[in-house]
Amino acid sequence: MSAEILPYLIIIPLFGAFSMPMVNLAGRKAREAWAVLISGATLAVGSWVFYWVYEKGTVLYTLGAKSPFGQANFPIRIVWEVDLFGALMVLMVTFVAFMAVIYSLGYMRHDTGLDKYYTLIIILELGMLGIAITGDLFNFYVFLEIMSIASYALVAFRNDTWEAIEAGIKYMFVGSVASSLILLGIALLYGEYGTLTMGYLALKLSQNPTIVGKVALALFISGLLFKSGASPVHMWLADAHPAAPSSISAMLSGLVIKIGGIYALARIAFSIYGASVSVKTVGWLIILFACITLIVGNAMAVIQTDMKRLLAYSSVGQIGYILLGIGIGLAAYGSQTGEIALAGAIYHTFNHALMKGLLFLIAGAVIHQLGTRDLNELSGLAKTMPKTTFAFLIGAAAIIGMPPLNGFASKWLIYESSALFNPVLGAIAIIGTAFCTAAYVRVLYTFFGRPSERVMEAKDPEKSMLWPMLILTIAIIVMGLFPWGISDKVMIPAAKALENQLAYVATLMGGG
Amino acid sequence: MIQFQFITAFLLIVLGIYAFLAKNNLLKLILALDIIDSGIHLLLISLGYRIELNEIPTAPIYTGYETLKSPMVGPLPQALVLTSIVIGVCVLALAMALTVNAYRHYGTLDVRALRRLRG
């Protein structure tokens, strides 16, 4: 029973996505109900998977026979392996995607071609779920491409505007080159070790680490840093995320750059390479990129006048924090500090998905009401859209890291571990937060300022848009009430599961 | 023995990356992406072709395996390359569609014109 539920994470969205054009023939109501039903069912399965992994430990699922030759006692077919880190990502993806789908009902009502929109949004979710659960490198590549192609198409969804097309083209070219680098890395690893299963590859790599393996790691890191929008190559992100419809921006910023970038990077660095390369060197390399990303992203956010662009740059900055956590986790591998840093990174990944999802949904509500996202024209929004402004206040406070909200705990873990590891890194992290605070205070200042004529006719959005925002706000507040409980019960075990390469391999070989 | 297939594959990849960085026409960029992909596919498929004991390997067909004298090529890379080609076609189709749209909005295929988003 345990692992048999796992394929439904893929089957349900796949079936839902490709039956969408047929359901669409029955009209708008059927289409919307179908989209909500499918993403809701996926959320239910995702929560169940998380619960199961949390209670029972790592789950292994083999596609095809367990031992095809009748003698090997380990699966050499495609395997899916979900540890607590992966399960947490599954929960995050299904939850935020469900909110985005509900939000789309109201937000996208005036667009055309909505059957394709819902098909793509569910395929996007499917690709991310696949990445989170897979234990096979080529399978990972296929899901990565499913996710990427769906997101290229969704960024360029409003193809009657030049902005969407330009952003889509930039995103597509950068993303395709990054995918090619990753595929090249996979080809090199396969040629050298003759296997694609992550756990078995880890075993072979630790027995015989070669230079080809290191070249492959370099290709993976560069490709995945591209995909996660780390700083020297973050330009596509600042164009692509604002240009997409807001519900998609929430998924891109909240989920795609994390699953397709951070999660995959952590999985490859820890679960495959953990025992066979100098983790200190790789860790410091990632820390270097993290520090640049942290400063550049947050500093660029301060000077933006476009609300969604500000949020996109802020995403770059927050990715910097998560990368910093991952980097310290690698550089201080095996020590208490590394564990705290890793737990902080995982915690912040989850929190940032909720916060940035919420903030982009709010930006969408503002655009829906006023037709502009220029901050200079949004003065005094607090009077006419009080609920939206309240949600923004919570989201902004959480992303800055104010104590009673969820962002505080995760940022605290990252500060603490970076200060313990190297005080300079701690200082850089704090400087990044100072910039971040400046950016959000500016937006809040605008919202609470003197009302301009333009905002007088605005009102809070309709129910289908308001509810996802409220649910995300409540999630942020509730998670903020038990910061250390969540950290001790979920995040530290998840970090331990990620760090423990032996257990990952043992589960694959049938020992666990 | 020199393994020409690997050298060709890496030459193709390098050529593709050069074209990607040096060219400005959107169509040429799409071609560059395809050349990089082709290089990787060539590398991947030639990994399955291993000459053992100086015998040319045959196609991976399992019926009549016992009577076969020579080794077989690896079937897995072929499956991988097939999958990868399908993905590549999908990306290419999307790129073409976006390029048509870009021509509609900008009236040119020069990427240097696609610079309106800034900041």
Image (tube, rainbow, N blue to C red):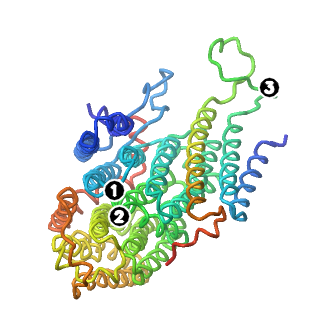
Q: Earlier in the sequence, mark 1 or mark 2?
A: 2
Read off the residue under disc 2: A339
The amino acid beneath tag 1 is Lys
Is B79 displayed left or right of A231 in the figure?
right
Callout 3 and callout 2 share a chain = no
Q: Chain of mark 1?
A: A
Callout 3: helix, strand or loop?
loop
* Residue found at x 38% / y 61%: A249
Residue B20 x %, y %:
68, 60
- Give the x, y percent position of residue A473: 19, 65
Q: Nearer the viewer, residue A464 or A192?
A: A464
Give the residue number, with chain letter if any, for mark 3: B55
> Which one is in front, A310 or A182?
A310
**Element marked by disc 2:** helix
In percent of the image, x 59 and y 65: which residue is there?
A: B106
Circles 1 and 2, Cβ within 8 Å, touching? The answer is yes
Q: Please tell me which residue lies in front, A282 or A28.
A: A28
Q: Residue placed at 32% from the left, 43% from the top?
A: A58
Q: Is residue A460 above or below residue A507?
A: below
**Chain letter of disc 3?**
B
Q: Chain of mark 2?
A: A
Q: Quadrant of the C terminus of chain A?
A: top left
**B7 with respect to A346 (left or right):** right
Tag in front: 3 or 2: 3
- For residue A496, the mark is 1
